[in-house]
Image (cartoon, rainbow, N blue to C red):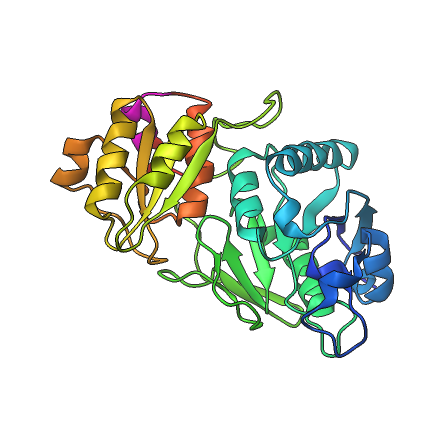
Amino acid sequence: MATRSKVAFIGTGGTISSLGWDSLDVLDYTATGQRLAADAILERVPEAGRVAEVIAVPFRAVPSPAIGFAEWRALAALCAELAEAHPDLAGIVIGHGTATLEETAYALGLTLTVACPVVLVGAQRPISALSSDAGLNLVAALRVAADPASRGRGVLVVLNDEIQAAREVTKTSVGRLQTFRTPDFGVLGHVDGPHVRYYRRPERRHAPDTPFALDGLAALPRVDVAYAYADADGTAVRAFVAAGALGIVSAGLAPGMTPPGEADALAEAVAAGVVVVQSTRAGSGVVPVTTRLRERGILSADNLTPQKARILLALALTRSRDPVEIAAMFATY
């Protein structure tokens, strides 16, 4: 038997760890409050031990809406500790709820210091459900983390036999198994049974080749997202500024516009020294750097979704308050 690669599995909770009322419960399972730790998940998926030597790493078991900066910082530190403690570690898999999985993936993709592959995995159906996707998703993620071809591609997301880049992937459906998509560019590769097949690489810079770090930070600078809609009058933007926001991401109308009242409030925010980044609620496409944006001192989020633009802007503000430097970061990461 071939030597199995060593992969660490960190469980953070989410649907992949959840136990529902019964095997037909695929909707109300969060009400049970039952979530398995990493070692208990592996007990339910013994096939995981056939594809890698898996180290179960205790962390916590929560729904992913409860995961944010504090958990990102702890996970980044834990990945560094695991890589140092296990020099032969081939990769790390993090089990995560799908609601904020893409945000954790991108935050780690900008701040990790480890060279080994880090793969986030989730499930659309609880591990207790009939035809749950939890077990096969976990096995696929372990295969990706163990594969030497996964090195140097940044943080990866694996569900439904698809390998996605942390920067680009987003959740697109409440309940369908093919929920995670990269709208403009598609998958990096596929997991076909035992075969990990790659077809492209992420082009933007990613960890560990970034200047960003979470250790030593008590909190990220406050950055809020203002969602544009017909007749939006800027009330939310003014409230964010009053609450102390150092940055605001405008989830604008495609291709990156806001109603007049919202535009006035964003102009006030820029005048008050708040860094404003224009994204779009469309879900794909680049926000062009137009004369209108330049004249108003508003930066482009490039093609980042609002929730990911918020993460990059918050990290950028830990390095600089200069809009020119921040704009360069949005063109780089």
Quick check: is 277 in the magenta stretch?
Answer: no
Q: In which quarter of the image is the C terminus?
A: top left
Who is closer to the viewer here, 279 or 169? 279
Q: Looking at the image, which residue is at 69% across and 73% down?
A: 26
Magenta span: chief secondary structure: helix
Q: Which residue is drawn at 23% across and 32% down?
A: 267
| Residue range highlighted in magenta | 321-328
Relative height, residue 88 to residue 320 (above, below): below
Left or right: where 219 falls relative to 222: right
Q: Can residue 205 be seen in this view?
A: no
Q: In this view, does 78 lie above or below 279?
A: above
Placement of the N terminus among the 4 image quadrants: bottom right
Q: Residue 159's quadrant in the figure?
A: bottom right
Q: Position of residue 181 (x, y in %)?
A: 47, 63
Quarter holding residue 83: top right
Picture mark count? 0
Q: Position of residue 95 (x, y in %)?
A: 69, 53
Counting from the top left corner in percent of width and height, residue 274 is at 34, 26
Does residue 281 appear in this view? yes
The magenta stretch spans residue 322: yes
The residue positioned 70% from the left and 68% from the top of the image is 28
- Indicate the position of residue 102 as horizontal and vertical percent values: 53, 51
Q: Is residue 87 left or right of residue 164?
A: right
Q: Nearer the viewer, residue 179 or 237?
A: 237
- Residue located at (73% from left, 43% from top): 89
